[in-house]
Image (cartoon, helix red, strand yellow):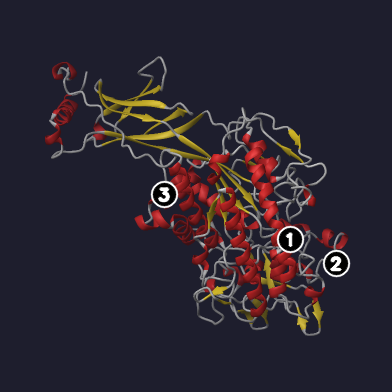
Amino acid sequence: MIRSSDRLLLLCALVVWALPASAQELSLPVPEISWRVENSFRFFTDAADTEVHRATYEALPPSDRLQRPVLAAEQELSRRHEIGWAATMFRDTCWNVQTNRFECGDKGRYINPRSHRVTATIDHIDEAERLSCTWLTAPLGGKNPRGRAITQPCSEPARFDVPYPDGLTVSVEIGGRSVATTTVKVRDLLVVGMGDSLASGEGNPDVPVRFSRERAASYGQRTASDDLSGYPARLGPWSTIGDDAFIEENPRWNDQACHRSLYSHQLRAALQLGVEDPHRAVTYVGVACSGAEVTFGLFLRYTGNEWVPNPPDLSQISAVATAQCGGHNAPLQDLPEAYHIHGSIPELKGGLTLRKCDPLNARKIDLLMLSIGGNDVGFARLLANAVLADHSTLRKLGGWFGQVHGLNEASAQLDALILRYKSLNRAIHYILHIPWEEADRVLLTAYPGLALLGDGSEVCPDGRAGMEVLSDFKLSEAKVKVGTWIADKLNRQMHEAADDYHWTFVDSHRREFIGRGICAGTSYDGANLADDLRLPRKTAAGWRPYNPADYPPYASRQRWFRTPNDAFMTGNFHVASSILQKVLKLNALSWFQLVLASTYSGAFHPTAEGQAAMADAVVMSARSVLEKYGQGPDKVHPRADIDPTGDLGQLLQ
């Protein structure tokens, strides 16, 4: 029996539903079912983390949601989270740091989900809190047309698991009458990210280093005129730089060895694709590693640039193939001849093996994001040539990578890169099973300009702005121009490779970096602290120009690249005393710790904002690719099934 108070409400509702279409147009809209995937970015194990990003996206102005959703969201999140939003999320992911595998719950279920939790509401019901709705969820193609029933107040959202990939028919009844029906079928995308430090998010640890407000650190004295005291000191109960307590305060990453973080533009693009479409879920597999090349990194095992007890045990291609297989085995394949291109890539000659998933077991990759090539041409060594003073000790030692490259060396490596891309293209199709006719699902991302000013034809001038952390650093405008010429040639070559292999080339972000290069900022008191290029040092008069405890690592700033000073203040990478003593034969207080803290901490890499700008460019291209293959957002609204012809008297008994 329906209560008398409900009878009038229900009668009024049914009268409205029974009106002709022309009358309904003048009245309230008919009821309809809205639904969304509860955790649309499945890499996050906590749906609340995904919800933070979804809610931030939905609160953006329409123009930002369309054109710059990731950058606008990053800037909004940075205002709310002092040390960055990733600090509370980076451990709750489907990346198992102990096994170096993508695992969540049951084996294989992360890659091949059986279902998705969905939240649904019934809209356009007056006095919904006073009516009861019965939700019917029937598997598509099942024998029971009504399926499972859930009865609750119409004002409350319903939650249920939707079988994947089949889906459900979902209906809502009020008083035994069907008022709305829709099909709920989740589109789950497998998005893969591979590449180097630009793809890993280097320079943007999930948990940055924090500094003491009072304490200062000393790195000794290199010369009579080069006193290395008064540097910002980490928080923590450490006694000596490099001791166990000091290393315990190192920055934290989603993957420590590879310096892979949640700020990676590949992850941010995949996350955006998940939160912007309520009917979509994204399964993300990101394996990019700082320092990787096409050879050592993608094809061959590379253990990253930070020592950890359990470094990566697979190359990136093998890691993706293993993930594709879910709970099945991806056996090793002996590939002695296929990928060295008649001996032109000597690193791949003799005994190349890669894991490959059987096509029957391999999940199809919907998007493969790539950022690779910079290390192959020795871009870090070109940087060393441009930013190390001519007579510095570090230049004499061969830079922080052991070599300093000029134009001739880089040009030779550019020629070799052409063949590496050709070999990689073969692996993408033969090993990772991306169909040849769908090669545009591969998105190759261009490198942004590091030091561009004005209209893009000018570069940062001579000087040490942003580089006072170590006296060896001094930017040369002339050498930066050489590096810029090489970088432009690299991007042209990447574009040509993308055209040759029918990949999608992503480069619209490059113009956004003009004016936001390594020297963008201020060097005077009273300006925005985030834009200050200077490194705080402690003197007898106190900290100048600001207290390091106040440094905002993820605040919005003019420059979109980390300077060596920024790297020291954000990543502050140091190694244990034992490693310096045993491997490098250096004292734990040596100035070489400053080299590590100002270079291996992500200097000359995009900030979180820079990564977000790159992610927006990737998202724009990804949207077009997905739309082409019928994987774009739904364009059909849920339908309302109206049955006003029944016996009202019987209904209201």
Q: Residue at x 41, y 19 (%)?
A: 141
Quadrant location of the C terminus? top left
Position above or below: 524 against 501 = below
Q: Which residue is mark 1?
A: 246
Of the two numbered discs 1 and 2 in the rendering, the one whose residue sits closer to the viewer: 2
| Residue 504 visible to the viewer | yes
Give left or right: position of 453 versus 341. Answer: left
Q: Nearer the viewer, residue 115 or 403?
A: 403
Position above or below: 296 against 137 = below
Q: Residue at x 64, y 83 (%)?
A: 541
Compare marks 3 and 1 and give the one earlier in the sequence: 3
| Residue 464 visible to the viewer | no
Q: Which residue is mark 2?
A: 586
Mark 3, other Cα within 10 Å: few <14 / some 14–19 / many ≥20: few
Q: Nearer the viewer, residue 248 or 75?
A: 75
Of the two numbered discs 3 and 1 in the rendering, the one whose residue sits closer to the viewer: 3
* Label 3 – label 1 distance at C-alpha: 38 Å
- The image position of residue 556, as x and y in percent, is 50, 66
Q: Secondary structure at mark 2?
A: loop
Compare marks 1 and 2 and give the one earlier in the sequence: 1
The label number, if any, that marks residue 457 in the structure image: none
Q: Residues at badges 2 and 3 in contact (C-beta under 8 Å)?
A: no
- Quarter location, residue 155: top left
- The image position of residue 307, as x and y in percent, is 76, 53
- The image position of residue 22, as x and y in percent, is 12, 35
Q: Residue at x 51, y 69 (%)?
A: 557
**Residue type at tag 2:** Leu
- The image position of residue 501, as x and y in percent, is 59, 48
Q: Secondary structure at mark 3?
A: helix
Quadrant location of the N terminus? top left
The label number, if any, that marks residue 55 in the structure image: 3
